């Protein structure tokens, strides 16, 4: 799965100013509502409910908040590069500055899992993560995120 199927240029927030996990999720829910046509409140509640199950901070400054929603027609992705790292209750207790949000239809099943795996692989690539942290240009971030997946050799 290529990420250009999930994320549009307007789904990139290149320099998000936030001071808490809740604020990050609120900002992402607002942007997601404009893109997918769902209620900002419903999106925020979905992301918050998932966080209550356990932090989506996966380590190395990366978080992948995600959730399934009844009324979605396809997968939607958003990416935020935070101006300053924030506490996210990550697995490694490190603050987060790269956040990829994934919203999926209720019955997405394997597509949802494949998308999460693809996002995680991309962001765990230290070269990609370094480049994402080094730029505040939304077009450059979009190009990095949507570059074709390289098959492992």
Image (tube, rainbow, N blue to C red):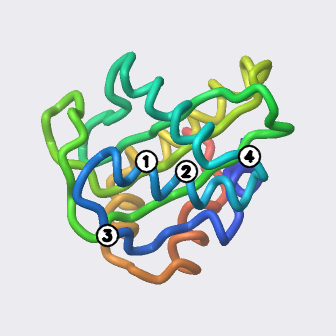
Task: Count residues near mark 4 (Cα–Cα under 10 Å), then give few for <14, some for 14-19, many for 20+.
Answer: some
- Give whichever of discs 4 and 3 has the lower sequence position: 3
Could you say whether the residue bearing mark 4 is in a helix, strand or loop?
loop
Residue 29: image tag: 2
Where is residue 63 shown, x and y percent of the image?
37, 42
Q: Which of the 4 image quarters holds residue 51?
A: top left
Q: CA distance from mark 2 to mark 3?
A: 15 Å
Q: Are marks 1 and 2 in contact (CB under 8 Å)?
A: yes
Identify residue for label 1. 25
- Give whichever of discs 1 and 4 has the lower sequence position: 1
Where is residue 141 shown, x and y percent of the image?
51, 71
Could you say whether the residue bearing mark 2 is in a helix, strand or loop?
helix
Where is residue 2 shown, x and y percent of the image?
71, 49
Rendered residue at 32%/64% (across/down): 82
Could you say whether the residue bearing mark 1 is in a helix, strand or loop?
helix
Residue 38: image tag: 4
Rendered residue at 73%/59% (across/down): 35
Assign the N terminus to one quadrant of the image: top right
- Give whichever of discs 2 and 4 has the lower sequence position: 2
**Residue 105 higher or lower than 129, as above or below:** above
In this rendering, would 89 be left or right of 70? left
Outermost residue toward the right in this view? 73
Identify residue for label 3. 17
Q: CA distance from mark 4 to mark 3?
A: 23 Å
Outermost residue toward the left in this view? 93
Q: CA distance from mark 1 to mark 3?
A: 12 Å
**Residue 113 higher or lower than 147, as above or below:** above
**Residue 63 higher or lower than 20, as above or below:** above
């Amino acid at each position: 799965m290529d990420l250009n199927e999930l994320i549009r240029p307007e789904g990139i927030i290149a320099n998000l100013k936030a001071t808490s996990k809740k604020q990050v999720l609120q900002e992402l829910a607002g942007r997601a509502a404009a893109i997918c046509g769902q209620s900002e409140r419903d999106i925020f509640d979905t992301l918050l409910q998932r966080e209550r199950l356990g932090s989506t901070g996966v380590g190395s400054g990366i978080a992948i908040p995600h959730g399934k929603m009844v009324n979605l027609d396809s997968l939607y992705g958003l990416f935020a590069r935070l101006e300053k790292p924030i506490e996210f209750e990550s697995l490694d207790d490190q603050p987060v500055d790269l956040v990829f949000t994934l919203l999926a239809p209720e019955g997405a099943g394997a597509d949802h899992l494949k998308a999460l795996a693809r996002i995680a692989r991309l962001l765990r690539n230290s070269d990609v993560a370094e480049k994402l942290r080094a730029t505040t240009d939304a077009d450059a971030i979009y190009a990095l995120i949507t570059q074709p997946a390289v098959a492992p050799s």
